[in-house]
Image (cartoon, rainbow, N blue to C red):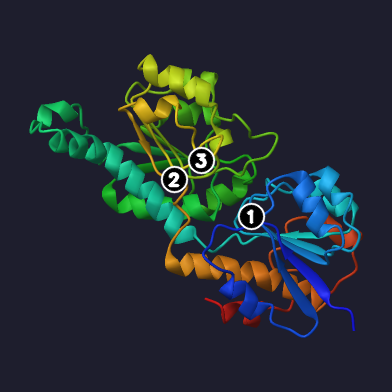
């Protein structure tokens, strides 16, 4: 009997032990690859029945060459590596893992906020350079009473909001997809983006990257911010116009930035951020813990199992419009996923 071909287009892990465990089945052949270009993906995935993807491009050009593919699952929350419209047209389910790192990312955003608020990274560097002088960290402002503005208000920023409130930090958010009545019923303070930029002492970016959100925080937004404002990004680098951010920092229109992501990753060695004292950088690590990594990889593989073996829509189906194109059953996989966490 012909086996289903499941391709892992690319990964950054030491092995694929979680994927191999979930996908161990007589009817499944797991094909590890390390694709970098569209051509790499086309060569290995043309006859694939399912694809697990990290960063390799699954563009319209790639998707139109797929002959058998029924499902694409992605390691992560965002699906910006996948042309979901093209996948829908081909009747391919696209799935992500939206709930694997809610605590990790919200914890990391909080860590960056606190590191900037107390000038931890700057003070550490000064002490290591032989400078024992608190005045080198001035100004530092009391956290209580400051305002955190959340750009996007999904699960992760909601978790962050809950974590900062005991510190006495006020929370406002911008999210055009939350109905006004829902926000009001839950007691959320949802404001326009311009108002958020004007009021916030910390602006933390959590929106998904789409064509409409690319460069969402740019020159106009920086011009509205307070001079003591700190911009935090644990989502996607391209949500912020890096050129505009560099200009705002150099001209002291805002105080600083704390970034876990960049427009191009890894960050290039001549990038201005690397020499800027008012920028804290971490290497796209906000999502990571040993537990979240295992959960991510297992759930991405389960999305394949849902479709190939159980003939169900994956639990974390992104392109729900595909239900009018592909014929599968509604997912009954709650108990199977619960066993992974």
When asked about the image quadrant of residue 198, the answer is top left
- Residue 158, how many percent across, how many down? 48, 53
Label 2 sits on a secondary structure element that is loop
**For mark 1, does the 10 Å Cα neighbourhood hold few (<14), some (14 to 19), or many (20 or more) residues?**
many
Can residue 237 be seen here? yes
Which residue in the protein does label 1 denote?
54
Camera-nearest residue between 90 and 19: 19
- Residue 244, how many percent across, how many down? 50, 20
Of mark 1 and mark 2, the one earlier in the sequence is 1
Quarter of the image containing the N terminus?
A: bottom right
**For mark 2, does the 10 Å Cα neighbourhood hold few (<14), some (14 to 19), or many (20 or more) residues?**
few
Label 1 sits on a secondary structure element that is loop
Of mark 3 and mark 2, the one earlier in the sequence is 3
Disc on res. 283: 2
Q: Measure how far apart labels 1 and 2 are at the Cα level.
A: 16 Å
Residue plotted at (39% across, 21% down): 249
Camera-nearest residue between 157 and 118: 118
Question: In the visual, does 245 lie left or right of 11?
Answer: left
Label 3 sits on a secondary structure element that is loop
Instruction: Name the mark nearer the viewer: 3 or 2.
Output: 3
Which residue in the protein does label 3 denote?
266
Residue plotted at (89% across, 58% down): 91
CB under 8 Å between callouts 3 and 2? yes
């Amino acid at each position: 009997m012909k086996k289903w071909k499941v391709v892992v287009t690319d990964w950054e892990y030491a092995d694929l032990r979680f994927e191999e465990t979930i996908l161990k089945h007589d009817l499944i052949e797991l094909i590890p690859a390390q694709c970098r270009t569209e051509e790499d993906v086309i060569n290995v995935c043309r006859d694939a029945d399912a694809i697990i993807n990290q960063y390799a491009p699954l563009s319209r050009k790639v998707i139109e060459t797929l002959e058998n593919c029924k499902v694409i699952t992605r390691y992560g929350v965002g699906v910006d590596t996948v042309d979901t419209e093209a996948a829908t047209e081909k009747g391919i389910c696209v799935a992500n893992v939206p709930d694997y790192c809610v605590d990790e990312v919200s914890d990391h955003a909080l860590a960056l906020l606190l590191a900037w608020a107390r000038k931890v990274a700057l003070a550490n560097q000064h002490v290591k350079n032989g400078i024992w002088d608190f005045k080198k960290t001035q100004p530092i402002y009391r956290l209580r009473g400051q305002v955190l503005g959340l750009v996007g208000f999904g699960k992760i920023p909601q978790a962050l909001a809950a974590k900062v409130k005991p510190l006495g930090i006020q929370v406002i958010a911008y999210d055009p997809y939350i109905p006004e009545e829902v926000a009001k019923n839950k007691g959320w303070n949802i404001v326009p983006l311009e108002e958020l930029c004007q009021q916030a002492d910390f602006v933390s970016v959590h929106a998904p990257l789409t064509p409409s959100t690319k460069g969402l925080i740019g020159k106009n937004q920086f011009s509205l911010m307070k001079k003591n404002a700190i911009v935090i990004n644990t989502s996607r680098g391209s949500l912020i116009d890096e050129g505009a951010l560099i200009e705002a920092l150099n001209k002291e229109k805002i105080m600083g930035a704390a970034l876990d992501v960049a427009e191009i990753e890894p960050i290039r060695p001549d990038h201005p951020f690397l020499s800027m004292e008012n920028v804290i950088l971490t290497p796209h690590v906000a999502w990571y813990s040993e537990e979240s990594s295992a959960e991510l990889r297992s759930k991405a593989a389960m999305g394949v199992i849902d479709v190939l073996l159980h003939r169900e829509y994956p639990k974390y189906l992104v392109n729900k419009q595909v239900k009018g194109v592909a014929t599968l059953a509604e997912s009954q996989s709650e108990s199977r996923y619960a066993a992974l966490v």
